[in-house]
Image: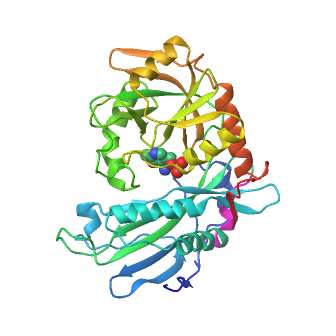
Amino acid sequence: MTARLEFRRELTTSPTPAERRREILANPGFGKFFTDHMITARWTPERGWHDAVLRPYGPFSLDPATAVFHYAQEIFEGLKAYRHSDGSIWTFRPDVNAARFQRSARRMALPELPVEDFVGALDLLIQTDQDWVPSGGEKSLYLRPFMFASEPFLGVRPAQDVTFAVIASPAASYFAAGVKPVSIWLSEEYTRAAVGGTGAAKCGGNYAASLLAQQEAIENGCDQVVFLDAVERRWVEELGGMNIYFVYDNGLIVTPELTGTILEGVTRAAILELAADLGYKVDERRVDINEWRQGVATGRITEVFACGTAAVVTPVGQLKWRGGQLTIGKGECGPVTARLRQQLLDIQYGRADDTHGWLHRV
Ligand code: PMP
């Protein structure tokens, strides 16, 4: 057992003026503004995790030969801190993100960070920058833990010097003007992940590889891209940054099973349990792209939604591909989607009983 990381504290001498902070929190957008502090820690084979510091937010100075620039040995996480109406601050299942971070680290030959140190780092940063956690209107503080190969060395092997860091960014409600269904582009040329590849890991390379398909989606008037499996080009996997669910007319809710090429979303897992709580039958299995098309045409599939930390639960209004398109239901947010979305938000914002014990008080 290694001892829990001790964080040295170096507080900023020039915090953002309160007035400017309030201005940002009124209209934070996403991923544009950052809080006053960040966390860093270092790993070497000799010393393990050490030199953990809470420090002023600021740039890294990295040697041009730093391995991450060349071989993309990097992983990250994304989760949110929510302010409840009594002012208290909570995160949603941070231990599940910590466990996924460990799995991603293993896949990318990076050192694992103990779950307690991951959660402890988040708590310390949130407590220090607690004035940056917005209140009201489904706003939140988005947390971005990440880890990268910081060794300056051009040899292709796992880095012997690794950096862990956490930054935080206030986030607006994703659907400020009401929940709006997204349109989805079916990527038939590009795939996201191969069997035996890195699809189940949250590593930067997966996102770099998805950008061209996402660009194609935008060019075709769609908001997001959906990927099929890389072998048969037949099974629906997930979106660029969200998992997907199908709602059937007989009360069944289906999401693609975890095959090793899909990211195991924290939201996806919560919805499996919430849907069962609400009396729906839930199934994890493969979904054929033609089952989606025919299911919508025959009315068997009544709703489709995407889910993830950023947008919570997002109705899918349309699917487009080269040579065709279809509208799901009336192209609006369906009742099952709306209900699951509301239930999850109510738990996260402390308006419903947290019967599963998912919330962690910061
Ligand atoms: N799939 C991908 C590829 C993602 O990037 C994300 C966002 N982390 C998700 C699914 C949803 O995961 P979560 O619910 O943990 O945010």
User: Range of the magenta residues?
Assistant: 128-135
Q: Is residue 137 visible?
A: no
In the rendered view, tell whether residue 23 sits above or below residue 212. below
Q: Quadrant of the C terminus?
A: bottom right
Judge whether 55 appears above or below 225 on screen: below
Residue most extreme to the right: 86
**Is 260 left, or right, of 292 in this rendering?**
left
Residue occupying the point 63% across, 68% down: 126
Q: Is residue 230 left or right of residue 227?
A: left
The x and y percentages for residue 83 are 73, 57
- Pinpoint residue 227: horizontal percent, then vertical percent: 37, 35
Q: Is residue 133 magenta?
A: yes
Question: Is 352 rendered above or below residue 322?
Answer: below
Q: How many marks?
A: 0
Q: Residue at x 31, y 67 (%)?
A: 109
Q: Identify whether 211 is placed above or below 33.
A: above
Specify the color scheme.
Answer: rainbow
Q: Is residue 120 magenta?
A: no
Give the image quarter of residue 336.
top right
Of residues 26 and 169, the one drawn nearer to the viewer in this rendering: 169
Image point (53%, 70%), residue name = 115
Residue 170 rendering spot, x and y as whole percentages = 60, 55
**Relative depth, front residue between 164 and 174:** 164
Where is residue 61 drawn, in percent x and y?
Answer: 35, 73
The residue most toward the top is: 298
Quadrant of the image occupied by residue 194:
top left
Looking at the image, residue 133 sits to the left or right of residue 161; the answer is: right
Can residue 69 be seen from the camera position used here?
Answer: yes
